Amino acid sequence: MATSGEAVTRHTLNTYCTEPVTLMGFDLACNWSGDVDVYVDSDNSAVFTCGNGHQNVTTWDAIA
């Protein structure tokens, strides 16, 4: 996992994130785009947090 610290590298990417939110009973999406720091481990796992607070756990292959 990218937070284990075994062989983590940091990459900065421009990305787009959507986080579902419920506001006054309505299902909405909180969209955000911009640069994020992606932490990638030797097992190909990647973790990053968007500006809207949504934490993403994925693989480096899926986003690079």
Image (cartoon, rainbow, N blue to C red):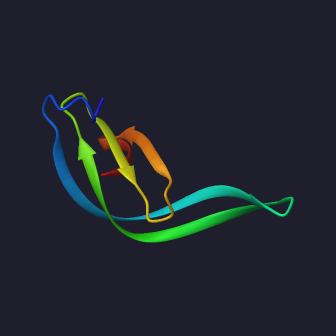
Give residue 28's position: percent from left, percent from top.
74, 63
| Residue name at image x 30 percent, y 29 percent | 1
Q: Nearer the viewer, residue 58 or 37?
A: 37
Q: Is residue 61 left or right of residue 31?
A: left
Q: Is residue 47 left or right of residue 44?
A: right
Picture layout, residue 4 above or below residue 27 = above
Q: Nearer the viewer, residue 61 or 12?
A: 12
Give residue 9's position: percent from left, percent from top.
15, 45
| Residue name at image x 67 percent, y 55 percent | 20
The quarter holding residue 11 reads bottom left
The quarter holding residue 41 reads top left
Number of marks in the image? Answer: 0
Q: Nearer the viewer, residue 36 or 22?
A: 22
| Residue name at image x 32 percent, y 41 percent | 46
Picture layout, residue 60 above or below residue 64 = above
| Residue name at image x 49 percent, y 58 percent | 53
Picture layout, residue 44 above or below residue 38 = above
Give residue 55's position: percent from left, percent from top.
46, 48
The residue sitting at the front extreme is: 24
